[in-house]
Amino acid sequence: MVGDPKKVCPAFMSKSSFLRLMLRTARQLVDPAQPAEEAREPVPGPAKRVVPGRVTEMTGFGSNPGELRMLVYAPAVRLPLNAPLIVLLHGCGQEAAAFAGQAGWIGLADRIGAALLLPEQQSTNSRGRCFNWFHPADVRRGRGEAVSILQMVNAAAKKFGSDRSRIFIVGLSAGGAMTAALLAAYPGVFNAGAIVAGMPVGAAQNLPMAVLRMRQADPYKGRDALAEAVRRSAPAHSQNIWPRVSIWQGEDDRVVDPANAVQLAAQWSAVHGLPEASAVATQGLAPGRHHRTWGPPSRPLVELWTLAGLGHGYPIEAGRGDGSEPGFAVLNAGLSATDHIARFWGITE
């Protein structure tokens, strides 16, 4: 991020200051005339070719009805045959490349040999640069931002020779909510996903409802209704094999009500046909870390991590040597979500 780090980086901010900043970002959803919190650094024009070891822009990937930017990253070394493709969706106010580095995904891509697809929202679509996860015209199959991201996936998979059975998606906050929507709309595209401080599918259909449900999860929506929202988004004429889902939430989040993570777990475990009572709690974790799984112990279909003391942001373990570091909505939790998500997906040991 550019500018004074004390203004944009949680590592240099008091908890109350960071909370006020994130709440102002949320309010931008309701008041588009409110300026974004940060000045955006100049963006270089699209590269004529993908440069290994650098984040570069690809154009001409499709009709792009959602008017998003397509950024990609591939390691400096040659990708192995049929390497995975990982889609990373940033949160409000973040820049795709900075988030990918700070959250440790670039370091992971270098380590395992994977390509990254980094869709980026533009301020012309959202003053807060939030993915429009609540707009039906942007999350339905064949519409808006959802189609733009699908076109990017197809272009990136072709460019990098990615294994079509090893396409994964992860997102934070608005990017997490958009991740959930894409997993529902295109279940055959993604092997698995991860939703960090996100929202259930179908939680809102307009701006005011989006902010309301961010602050308070719907107390009246049960498992059946949550699961039906996913099924309505998917192809009507096909029997879907649903993606596996990893869900992460800070218990001190004041931007997204932590109850939304509980609803996400209920939503996806119900879609997979798993009873709520079948959850298994992991024992022996460090104090304040809670982990539950649904499905086979050796390969759970849904998992939920909740972290005490963590606010609104992406959990990392600083000092791992993978390039991850605290930044805007990237928080040192002493635990690497990226590492655990990759292991849950089965792309690392």
Image (tube, rainbow, N blue to C red):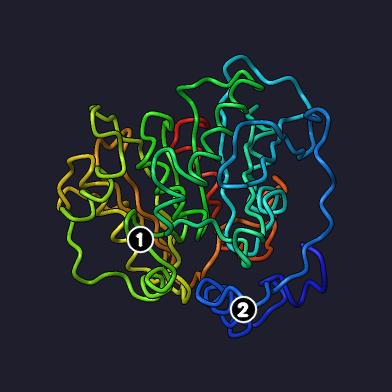
- Gap in angstroms between the C-alphas marked 1 and 2: 22 Å
SS for callout 2: helix
Residue 21: assigned label: 2
* Residue 261, disc: 1
For the N terminus, the image quarter is bottom right
- Residue 220: give x, y in percent of width and height: 18, 69
The residue tagged with tag 1: helix, strand or loop? helix
Q: Is residue 63 above or below residue 332?
A: above
Along the line of sight, the residue nearer the viewer: 189 or 68:
68
Rendered location of residue 334, percent (x, y): 57, 60
298 on left or right of 31: left
Q: Are dots 1 and 2 in contact, CB under 8 Å? A: no
Q: Is residue 345 above or below residue 318?
A: above
**Viewer-side residue, 212 vs 20:** 212
Q: Amino acid at mark 2?
A: Leu
Q: Is residue 221 left or right of residue 212?
A: left
Neighbor class of circle 2 (other Cα within 10 Å; few <14, some 14-19, many 20+) is some
Residue at image point 39% right, 35% down: 186
User: Would you identify the image quadrant in which residue 328 lies?
Assistant: bottom right
